[in-house]
Amino acid sequence: MAPIVTGRFQDVAEATAASKGMPRERFTYIHHPVSNKPAAECRKYIEGNDPLTGKPVIEEIVAALTKPLSEEEKKTGFVEKPRERLLKPDTAQNLERQFLENGWTDGLLIALPTEQRVSEMLKATSHKPDEIVGRMMPSPAQGPWKYTVEMVAANAVMAGAKPKHFPVILALAATGQGSLPSSTSSMARMMVINGPIRNELKTNMGIGALGPFDEANAVLGRTWTFITKNLGGGGKAGTTYLGTFGNNYNYNNLCFAEKEEALPSGWKPFHVQKGFKQGESVVSVFNGWTLLNYSAYNPDPYHELMRRQMVALEMSGAGAHHTPGVNIQTAGMLIIDPVTAKALKEEESFETKEKLSRWLTENVHFTMWNYWNAMPDYLKKAKEGVQPYASLLKRAPESDSPLQLFSPKAGVEIVVVGGETNPYWYAGDFRYLASASIDQWK
Amino acid sequence: MRWATVCRIFLTMAVIALVACAQKTAQAPGQKPGSGSSLSDAASIGTTVPTMVELSDMYVSPETYDLKVTVAEIIRGEKSMELLKKLGASNGQPATDSEYVLARVCFEYKARGAPGDKPWELSGAQFSAFSENNKPYGSPSILALQPGLKPLLRPGDTLECWLAFVVAKSDRKPVMAFNPGGAWFHLY
Amino acid sequence: MKKGTGWLQIGICLLTCLFVTCTQKPEQRVITVLNPVGSPSPTPLIPMAPRLDMLEGKTIYIVDVMYPLTHQLFEEIQKVFSEKYPKTKWVVKSKAGTYFDDDPKLWEELKANAQGMIIGVGH
């Protein structure tokens, strides 16, 4: 086999191959990018040199296919990377610098995970220190890393978490979801907490709920970043993180709790919608890119404003233009202030979250202009006169296409939180990933 | 007299050093031996190894499921050949100096939380045997003992089945790896 | 030697040690912390397939993993290699589905019909 990759992804290609048991794979690299380049230009890349080695691409490919294997390349067995439980003793100052320079932090000061601090943290769970909590994959193509209760505790200490936060952190770690997806598109993650633990931890569900205004939201979101980088192998620029911009949401990972007490009657808390009991404490995680902020008093109903607003999400993240025909439909999410939620129920007859979700899923469509990008095969058929596609060519570019933006499977998730200062809401493209019981980790 | 003084000083320093060392960190909480978490720490017959598998229908991070695996019984040598012969004449002798190892393996598959609705596809390719000195064995092409591997486990399912391997007769301590679960088991 | 002198010496030693420990500045104190970093699961090494002795007379598949808008690269690879190695058969194949998807049927076809593969992720 002779694999070819564009030069920009050398690190990730080699790291992925190594993680799959092929550390000696014979890669040939060519110019980046190739996507949408004319054939003549592609030919130049093939006839030219590997941008990383300087050697002719053709020669490298032939060598990959024909050069006899070395002894290293013939090796079998397992590769294990042992780890030490403790770091080499040093002064606090040197250790803090070591943590920073090794990329184990978020660039801000941390609390060093001394044995005493970790031991205090471990008292907050009945689970043993050496119990495996979960596994996390550095990227979808790489093998998983697994981590114990003690390892999670060390990272929780670093983030400034207190023992009372630890069961939430363990539940989060148990989902196996990292906070720094490897995608070039700079994804963000979100965590939402439900159940009695919100009040035990005094999470802020009012004014500034998504901002830097309380301890719980701050440390929980921060710990997620540390777990991802240190225990999940994620967040390494070039190999397991390729986001071209990064995403500022990653600093706190949009950590907040749902204001269940302010839900209109008939609107279930998010965790109950996912099958948990009202009295259970649960953490749920989401993945997306964008939140659009809006508010209104007059004249249009909120659900209609939401519908129009959410059409904009057809151009959020890595959509139809990035990967035509691939990532077609997206997911939707609403984070709604209680004032808005009340109006949706009492004035616009959305008796449940599910009803609103259904209505938006059915009524938010791709615009015709973007429909053809999302469905290039249909455009081809339309131009050939094949129905029903051909008749769609007559529709105005900004009008609704037949294609729903949100897949029925993902739908629109709805969470209520906020300080009730005005009828605001966020419309976003966050997709629900998983939920885990916090009570299980007490 | 001088020697007595030197001894007293030495003893004092030794006591101080001992006290200092005793305040050092307690023993690391290690995993129990034979936990199955690595090749060098493979699980014995009858030990249940809790593993995890990840499932996804998109390139976004996959969902974690718990999969407990136990090697409950091992049959090798003449006894294994006898059982395989009963299944069919096509189950011939393995290569010279090799013999079959039959492993009865139990599975328990559970979701961790929500959504928790994805099945896990079990296949023979996920199990491989290694020699005592870490060399992989090939997979035999034979009719397997029943019950065989069922291809799909749904959340909440349990399964018991037989797997077959071929190992060197002289290898009395082969090991089985389950990937992607990341668990190791003694085949003896 | 006077009585009690030995014990006096022990006392001096103890006091000296205490003095050294207590007068050490906090930032100079050496501490031990836990390693916050985990490690990947042990990885089975997959041995590489034997290489071809020569290209002449062989069939080599050129597989496009199907990242969008990159198929032209693989068509050009076929053209260039066909010109340079005319005694080898170069066949372009598109993997089924999107670039996320596996294609077991293609791998079976490849094993049956080809002796090697160039596989690429255009991007």
Image (cartoon, rainbow, N blue to C red):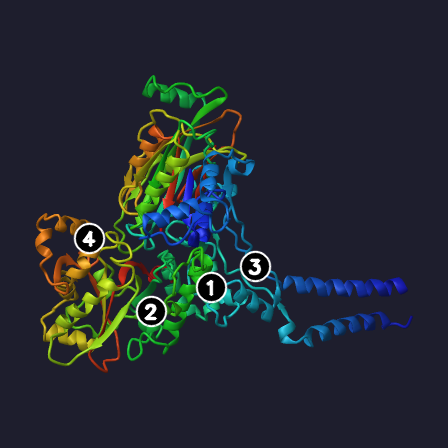
Tell me the amino acid under the disc marked 3. Leu
Tell me the amino acid under the disc marked 1. Asn
Q: CA distance from mark 4 to mark 3?
A: 54 Å
- SS at circle 4: loop
| Residue placed under numbered mark 2 in the picture | A254
Mark 3 and mark 1 on one chain: yes
Q: Position of residue A73 (x, y in %)?
A: 52, 38
Q: Position of residue B31 (x, y in %)?
A: 50, 50
- The total number of labels drawn is 4
Q: Do residues under tags 4 and 1 come within 8 Å of each other at their CB atoms?
A: no
Q: Which residue appears at 38% of the width and 68% of the height? A: A221
Q: Nearer the viewer, residue A132 or B59?
A: B59
The answer to which of marks 4 and 1 sits earlier in the sequence is 1
Tell me the amino acid under the disc marked 2. Leu
Q: Which residue appears at 52% of the width and 52% of the height? A: B30
Q: CA distance from mark 3 to mark 2?
A: 32 Å
Quadrant showing the N terminus of chain B: bottom right
The subunit carrying tag 3 is A
The subunit carrying tag 4 is A
| Residue placed under numbered mark 1 in the picture | A155
| Residue placed under numbered mark 3 in the picture | A86
Tell me the amino acid under the disc marked 4. Met
Q: Do residues under tags 4 and 3 come within 8 Å of each other at their CB atoms?
A: no
- In this picture, is A381 found above or below A223? above
Q: Closer to us: mark 4 or mark 2? A: 4
| Residue placed under numbered mark 4 in the picture | A375
The answer to whether residue B91 of the structure is visible from this angle is yes
